[in-house]
Every structure is written in C-alpha cells, then in structure tokens.
Image (spheres, grey):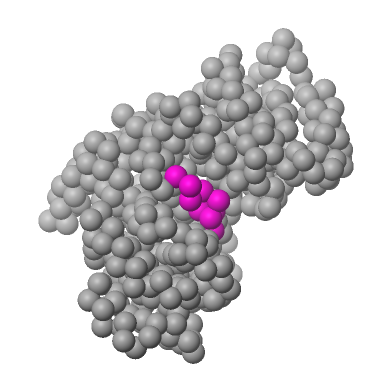
Amino acid sequence: MVEADAATRAAQLCDAAVAGDRLSLARLLTAVENRTAVAEAALRRLYPTAGRAHLVGITGPPGSGKSTLVAALIADARRAGRTVAVIAVDPSSPITGGALLGDRVRMQAYAADDAVFIRSMASRGHAGGLAPTTTTAAVVMDAAGFDLILIETVGTGQSEVEVAAAADTTVVVEAPEMGDEVQAIKAGLLEVADLVVVNKGDKPGAQRTAAQLRAMLVATAPRDDDAPRSPSRPRPKRPEILVTIAATGEGVPELLAALDRHRASGRVGESSAARLARAEAQVWAILGDRLRERLHQPTRAAATASLLADVAEHRMDPYAAADRLLKAIAEG
Amino acid sequence: MTDRRIKVLIAKPGLDGHDRGAKVLARGLRDEGFEVVYTGLRQTPEMIATAALQEDVDVVGLSILSGAHMTLVPRVTKLLAERGMGDVLVTVGGIIPDDDVSALREAGVAEIFGPGTTIAQVADYLRANARPRH
C-alpha cells in the first residue's frame, strides 16, 4: 500500500529530523517541494509541534542586499546563541521551468555550524515572491526546532506581498535612492512592512532615503493610540525604519533587536492576524489541490476535460463551468 | 500533484578565481530546465558537502581549473559518503589530465567533462544518469 509506505517513511524522516539529523530534514524539505505523499504525512505529524519559531520575511527589490542582510542576521543571531534556518527563494524560468538559485553565495560562511541550515527554493511558477510550498517548508523547519527562520523572497517589485502572510514579522529592504516620496506612499510592498531597512547605508543618499521613508510611512500612518478600527477597516502598519550596512554588519544588531521587539510588542493582534492569514492561505491551497484531484479522478476526468474544452471554445462561460463542477462534487 | 526537477549544485572548490565557465554552465543548465544551486568561488570541500546535503541535490558538479583536483575531489566524495549522500552523482568539469581520470573515477566521480563539452551534452548526461529524489 503506497500510502502506508509514505506514512512510515514520513515518520522515520520526521523523528530523525526533530532529533537533529540534517539529512532527514533536507529529504523532508524535498518531499515538501515535490508535494509527495510523504510530505502530507510529515506535515500532519509535525504541524502540532510547530509554531514556536520566529518567522521573519525578508523582501525587497533585486540587488537591495537581502541575501547579504540574511547572512549578517545569521551571524548576529548565532552570537546570541540562537539556531537559524533560512529559506531563500529565487525565481523559476517561466519558459523552461529551470532556476538559478544563487542566494547561498553570500551565506557560505556557516558550513561548519550545525545550528545553521540554509535551503534554496525555486519559485516554480508561483507569482507572489515565494514558492508554492515555502510556508510548509517553514513549518518543517519550525518543528525541527530552529529558533529563527528567515524567509528571503525573490527580488520583488511593488505588489508581491505574500510574504507578509507567511511570516510573523516582515522586513522590507530598500537601497538608497530607489525612489522619491511618492514611491513611499504608493500602496503595496511598503504597506506590509513591520520594519523597513535602508541597506547600503554607506552609500550617498541613505540617510535621506531613510528620512523620506520616516516622513511618509510613520507620519502618515495612524498612531498606536488611535481609536481601534473595525475589522473591515484594518489599521495600516507604522513600520520602524532602520539603516544598515549588511556587508560590514553595521546596524544589524539593532535590526535583530527590532525584530525581537516586534515579536514581543503589543502588536500581538497584528501577528495573530498574520497567523490567521497564513492558516487561511494554507487551507485554501490544500482545498484547491483536493478539488483538482477529485475532478481529475478517473471517473470524472473525461467530464471535467469536456467542460474545460467547452469554456475554451466559448460554448460555456467559466462561472457556469465552475458551478457545474462544484455541483458534481457536492453530489458525490 | 507531484512536481519533480533535477537539482544540481555547481561548485568551484579550491583557490582559482575563474568561474566564468561555472557560471555559463549554471545558466545553461537553468535553460535546460534544471534547478541549479550556485555557491560561488573558493569553496572548501566542507562547504560543498554541507550545501549538497542541505539542498538535497541530485548532482554535484565540480569545476576545477587549478590542477588541485586530485586533492580536492576525493575529499568532496569522501565527505558526501560520510554524510549519507554517497548516492549523489558527482561530475567534474575542467582540465583533467588523462592519467588522473581513472583515479578520479575510483574516488567516485561518475563523469568528467573536458574542454569543448557542450551544455547540451552535460544536460543529456545528467538527465540520463541523475536520479531525482523522492
């Protein structure tokens, strides 16, 4: 029985990974990425014990220094005696499906340190800045006992905000002189930041960029003592703005302290909102997979295919097709 | 809903500073549909084995032009075997004298790609010989 084998294999890998075996952890992450039966059994086993790690998302435009900042954060977190796991996402080619995963280049100093575990992930067609299985991979690392999990997104533009739901604390990394004050008040990436880091702080304009961001993001957001809003009108965040030089580590201890403050602060409401959003995204994704599996079962595959063909040929509209498929599933 | 791709680590062990070839290969394999982890210059065998393990790669491709292959390559294969990654396909690219080929094969190297090898040849070889993991 294939499923029983998967459960046995998952149990072996999970027990070993939780006990500290890094090869088993690596194999579990591969199962997660490849969405195998082992991954599902493993996640079911590990999920109840996860939720202890601090999940930190690191996002920002290409070349702003995310990987270098991650490397610097690893160094400081290790000095503080914490264990660190990293998920570094780089884009998959939309044409060939291949990927060049190059974030490790900046993180190779920790090869001999068993308390640091770095994993690259290709985005595999997913558009939000993460891979489709990044959240699940973080659960596995969390259950394996890492204190701090850094999730580095692909280089992002203005609207890849998915990491905010995947992480407890979201750091947006900017380089100096990347835009004027109008860029800072546009909706999107900067809105989901709990912390904004202006990296390359030794470059001209870094302090001015930080001052502009402070003026626009902090001054225009509501104060913490504003009357609470209704859930239908969520309160914009008031991110703290820091300047770092990741290449030398300058400003990084302050960033680590700010991460801890954010986690420990009274913003538990926001953080639990992030956790709820994460739970919702996970369940919806699985629900979507499950629906697709059901509709492609041998008994149904032909009917599904002919319905899709009807939509392709404009004989049926996509809403009607979706309703028809839902009805078919509901009726068993 | 499974989704499998062959994952390749391209690493440059040792001290030579020429990684144009390794980068061209990494990019070429990307275009052939592989997921390629590139770790940069001056990698110790320890770094390569750790990266191979954490990334759970199917293939380790070592690019060496320094002439130090007889020292570095067997150290990488030994570390991989010690860490339970003995089944990873190890290939070497670079300038390897004919006299060293059999010793490298004995050390666990599956294939050696000399100057003039095309990316398509490497890709075909990897597709035929690497076992994507479950």
Instruction: Give the quadrant of the N terminus of chain A.
Output: bottom left
Q: Position of residue A228 (x, y in %)?
A: 68, 13
Q: Using the rendered image of the protein, determine whether residue A167 is visible from the camera's viewpoint.
A: no
Q: Position of residue A283 (x, y in %)?
A: 42, 39
The residue depicted at 47 percent of the width and 43 percent of the height is: A86
Determine whether, in the image, residue B124 is placed left or right of residue A220: left
The residue depicted at 26 percent of the width and 48 percent of the height is: A24
Quarter of the figure with residue A284: top left
Q: Position of residue B72 (x, y in %)?
A: 36, 66
Determine whether, in the image, residue A312 is placed left or right of residue B51: right
Q: Nearer the viewer, residue A91 or A41?
A: A91
Query: Which span is picked out in magenta?
Result: A101-110
Inspect the magenta stretch and tell me whether residue B79 lies in it: no
Please, is residue A39 above or below residue B118 in the view?
above
Determine whether, in the image, residue A76 is placed left or right of residue B107: right
Inspect the magenta stretch and tell me whether residue A108 lies in it: yes
Principal SS element in the magenta part? helix
Q: Position of residue B21 (x, y in %)?
A: 54, 76
Please, is residue A204 above or below residue B3 in the view?
above
Quarter of the figure with residue B91: bottom left
